[in-house]
Image (cartoon, rainbow, N blue to C red):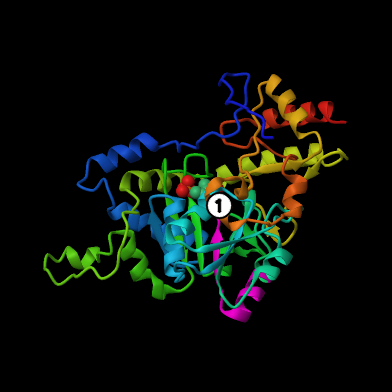
């Protein structure tokens, strides 16, 4: 069912699907780190958390971690999710969203996809809510925020925790406000192909400051690091923690990338708009787009079309790499036990028809123009 599309060779004539963004001053930034005693988690991680909160969360507290997946695991623990608890999750997402729930042994209730936005389908979520629902996890697919008002309405009624996987939506806004305002926990990823990167890294954002101390402790074995640096034995470990910290090496790259974020955003937005403006009159193509209230972060540009396979192959021939990026999670054996006798109508309809076009800072605006023209030529 899924065709095999190996990665293309890089050359001047090809456009890859993704490319990491390396900040201009990366060497200088790393050199500085290597001239100090802190290369693991040190003062730059603290600095990054403060700057990140100022810039992206309206000062909600941020906790830097080793990956987006780490942040998700910590968010699930802090939400109080325990073995056997019901958690409503998106069927269509990066598997990293759902895998940490398997660490805990939670009972995953998959919600169908909304074929217009590729986000979690609100009606499907409503049907899955029971007295036992502990949390709702949702992902802003490609960078497009979910209907955060609706999700809050559902959660409020039954005191359900909301966990927002914003791994792809750094810089997205909802009704002109930072998306972090609308969930108990929000996570970001700085994995290699995300808007900004530390190689691997992540951020956990907390709506309630009360969780901050525990979040920091379980990021680091369960140890209160500051107290421990006091050098006494009075620092018992009372809860199991992990080794989920970020390093100062990674933080130094992110601090540089944040300085460039406006330009990164603008470049990605330009590419996004070139695709949009060139493809919007093509009646055979549906564009997954923002509206006035849900502002996209331009991480993925996704189209839905009948002839997905045909287009993907044609673009390959012209050196353009496109992919589906994520697949429905019920295809994976590890999730099979949660989907017995279940059907997901919307997902069934679109699973072979969505395709993601390249966006990254390495490609040029003219590349996007060329790709759009190619698409209009092939699909008309
Ligand atoms: C990238 C990504 C993650 C995982 O982040 P890592 O930093 O790779 O652990 C989780 N969810 C979504 C939606 C992602 O795109």
Q: Is residue 244 visible?
A: yes
Left or right: 243, with 366 as reference point: left
Left or right: 380, with 36 as reference point: right
In front here: 237 or 39?
Answer: 237
x, y (%) of residue 288? 74, 48
Residue 371's image quarter?
A: top right
Residue 154 located within the stretch drawn in magenta:
yes
Left or right: 45, with 147 as reference point: left
In front here: 347 or 263?
Answer: 347
Q: Which residue is mark 1?
A: 335
Left or right: 337, with 247 as reference point: right
Residue at screen point 44% across, 71% down:
80
| Vertical arrangement, residue 323 with respect to residue 57, above or below | above
x, y (%) of residue 138? 60, 60
x, y (%) of residue 301? 68, 42
Residue 88 located within the stretch drawn in magenta:
no
Magenta stretch: give its range: 150-168
């Amino acid at each position: 069912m899924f065709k095999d599309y190996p990665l293309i060779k890089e050359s001047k004539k090809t456009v890859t699907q993704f490319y990491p963004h390396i900040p201009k001053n990366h060497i200088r930034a790393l050199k500085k780190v290597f001239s100090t005693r802190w290369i693991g988690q040190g003062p730059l991680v603290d600095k990054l958390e403060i700057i990140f909160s100022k810039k992206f969360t309206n000062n909600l507290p941020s906790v830097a971690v080793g990956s987006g997946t780490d942040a998700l695991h910590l968010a699930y623990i802090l939400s109080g999710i325990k073995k056997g608890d019901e958690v409503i999750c998106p069927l269509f997402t990066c598997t990293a969203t759902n895998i940490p729930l398997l660490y805990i042994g939670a009972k995953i209730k998959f919600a169908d996809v909304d074929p217009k936005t590729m986000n979690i389908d609100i009606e499907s979520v409503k049907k899955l809510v029971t007295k036992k629902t502990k949390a709702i996890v949702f992902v802003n697919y490609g960078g497009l925020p979910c209907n955060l008002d609706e999700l809050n309405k559902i959660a409020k009624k039954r005191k359900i925790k909301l966990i927002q996987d914003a791994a792809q939506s750094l810089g997205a806004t909802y009704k002109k406000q930072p998306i972090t305002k609308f969930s108990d926990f929000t996570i970001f990823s700085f994995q290699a192909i995300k808007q900004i990167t530390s190689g691997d890294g992540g951020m956990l954002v907390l709506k309630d400051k009360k969780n901050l101390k525990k979040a920091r402790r379980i990021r680091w074995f369960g140890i209160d690091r500051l107290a421990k640096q006091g050098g006494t034995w009075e620092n018992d470990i009372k809860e199991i923690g992990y080794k989920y910290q970020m390093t100062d090496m990674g933080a130094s790259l992110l601090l540089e990338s944040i300085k460039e974020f406006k330009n990164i955003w603008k470049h990605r937005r330009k590419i996004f708009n070139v695709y949009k403006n060139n493809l919007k009159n093509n009646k055979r193509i549906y564009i997954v787009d923002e509206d006035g209230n849900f502002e996209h972060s331009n991480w993925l540009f996704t189209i839905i079309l009948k002839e997905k396979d045909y287009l993907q192959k044609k673009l390959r021939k012209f050196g353009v790499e496109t992919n589906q990026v994520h697949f429905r999670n019920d295809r994976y054996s590890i999730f099979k036990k949660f989907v017995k006798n279940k059907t997901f109508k919307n997902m069934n309809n679109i699973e072979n028809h969505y395709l993601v076009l390249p966006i990254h800072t390495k490609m040029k605006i003219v590349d996007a123009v060329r790709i759009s023209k190619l698409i209009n030529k092939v699909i008309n």
